Image: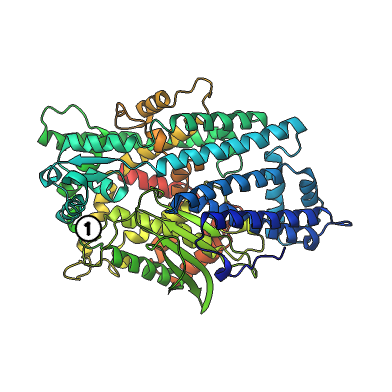
Amino acid sequence: MSDPHWAIERIPLDRSAAQFTNFTREHLAYAQSLLSQTLAVSGPRTIANTLDPLNEMWMHVDLVASHSELFSQVHPDEAVRHAAEEGSKEVSKFVTGLWLNRDLYNAYAAVDVSGADEATKYMVTKALRDFRREGVDRDDATRAKVEQLNQEIVDLGLAFKRNISEDTRHLEVESPSDLAGVPKDLVDAWVKESEKTPGGRIRISTDYPQYVPFMKYAHSDPLRKELMTLFMNRAYPANIEPLTKLIARRDEKAKLLGYANWADYATEINMIGSGANALAYIDRVQGITRAAADREIGTLLEYKRRHDPAAEGVNAWDVSYYLNKAREDRYDVNPQEVRRYFDFPDVMDGLLTVTGRLFDVKYVKVEGLPLWHPDVTAYDLVRDGERIGRFYLDLFPRENKYKHMAQFDYAQGVAGKRLPQAVLVCNFPKPDGTPGSALMEHGDVVTFFHEFGHLLHTLFAGRQTWVRNAGISTEWDFVEAPSQMLEEWAWRHETLKLFAKHYETREPIPADLVAKMQKARMFGEAYHWARQTWLAAISLGYYTADPATLDTTQKMIELTQKYSPVPYMEGTHFQCSFGHLDHYSAVYYTYVWSKGIACDLFSPFEKNGMFHGATARKYRDRVLAPGGSRKAGELVKDFLGRDFTLDAFERYLKQGA
């Protein structure tokens, strides 16, 4: 078998189900041949005869894993999605076999890397650690059980994600009068869409472009409650069993390998170190934010009583609506006015303009590629006239597509062998070619910057020697920090004025409006971070509980009572659509932890300027470009000149308080 070409142009972008299956088999077969050749080496093991061919093996594995994960979530053809799911199972089985292969472990351990560079030493150290964490040094029965559990975990995770992506629910209303409060452009679009449905009823989707503005603007309390109930019950009851079994299988694996629970297993190799440390940190942040969050809820109750004098409390379906009302009243910020400055095409151009200037790169659109859907676009990332990567944007909602926002790998880059490729998958309003047809909430703009931060991290870190050091391969509780930091460029007038233009007048967003937005931002931040600790507590709570007695709904109620500023919503089962419970498992706390790092990383920009060239280049080259070739704490220290602290985050939280 000849080695498949690594050039960007030779990695397929779309294929039939049969072609996808052949792609999976071809790359895994070649990976197996490299493994066999490497294990057959006689004589002293070296970087050249062992680590180099194994690196190429991992490159083949990476392609299958990345493509399977992506296309199982986004491809419009059900047969291809199914083939991609099967690809995920096959590559997982292959990888499990690698980690349990004692001969392979011994081969890594036998290579003398004492004279190698630090990145090589670190890669080997991580590999040997991961072998041991999978049980390579255990007896045959234990290793066989780990292999079985790993496959069950993959199967259950795939089912869990599939049930979420395939479950879009709709609220149906009789007339535009039921949409009172919703911006006119959205009402007009939704009414127009209703003309295509039987009966002409107006359907409001649980997908983000409709769900978020409805919950923020719609005056009708009963309809907001009804839509949120639909949203919070996506994938229920289908995901109750897969989630319960997923938690149980992970717990069984952790205990089999000597850990108290899955949370301890998952956090051991992260910056935070243990499940107990993660919970202590969550409780620390809760202690800073909860009293302020409760005061914010009290303020929202005051606003609610202006409409309902008999109101006794604020419910989950009230929060977005009354936060909007309070910010408008207290800070003179009308979000409907703000939306007029964020037409999707302008935001798209602005994102590229801002990040291009910040990181000294250019984006070149690539036409004529056979992509998996007409909505998908492609760009090359260019620096100093040289293409350093490619990315794809799949930004608008459709049936059976991933429902949230995320960056997916497409091909991890390896220096001199393969350029990195990545995919941004989002669900933003889709423009129809006329100005103002896809006005965005400012929160969506912030999310766009956040997710693009992941993409740039992947591409800038695509020149590592070892594929297992490439891209976002740092500790899991660091990966959100660069993206959270990039959100700040969506909040400053210095950057917003470059692209935020009124869709009718084309006037740039006024500085005084941005100043009001920044002040209004802080009202609700305590609630936001208290809510994040609630989500983190669910993640940790499920994966520290005894699976034999765990009722995920009852546990949800208990954790809501302890951590959430608003009461549990009767009759809902949010855990069934909380996709992070699969991919992040016990480590959702990372959003709260990494925010602390992000605040610290941002401090030099706050001091030197949003586009300070030397600061940006230093950050790009010392934090993003190294990928996973060093510990995250070392990268941050290299940039800041000191160890990171959480002081800036605590000041930020207390400012909101």
Q: Return the residue at label 1.
A: 339
Determine whether 230 is above or below 354 in the image.
above
Residue 216 point in image, percent of width and height: 22, 45
In-front residue for pair 500/380: 380
Q: Measuring 38% from the left and 54% from the top, which residue is drawn there? A: 426
Position of 113 with respect to 429 (left or right) is right
Q: On the image, which quarter does residue 52 sit in? A: bottom right
Where disc 1 sits, the SS reads helix
Q: Residues within 10 Å of mark 1 (few under 14, many from 20)?
A: many
Extreme-bottom residue of the structure: 385
**Three-letter amino acid code at the position of disc 1:** Arg
In-front residue for pair 339/252: 252
Q: Looking at the rendering, in which quadrant would you find the N terminus?
A: bottom right
Determine whether 175 is above or below 144 in the image.
below
Determine whether 87 is above or below 462 in the image.
above
Position of 258 with respect to 236 (left or right) is right
Residue 155 in sight in this render:
yes
Q: Looking at the rendering, in which quadrant would you find the C terminus?
A: top left
In-front residue for pair 266/617: 266
Residue 546 point in image, percent of width and height: 53, 23
Q: On the image, which quarter does residue 638 sit in? A: bottom right
Position of 299 with respect to 251 (left or right) is left
In-front residue for pair 591/318: 318
Residue 654 point in image, percent of width and height: 34, 43
Q: Measuring 66% from the left and 29% from the top, which residue is drawn there? A: 256
Q: Measuring 46% from the left and 73% from the top, which residue is drawn there? A: 361
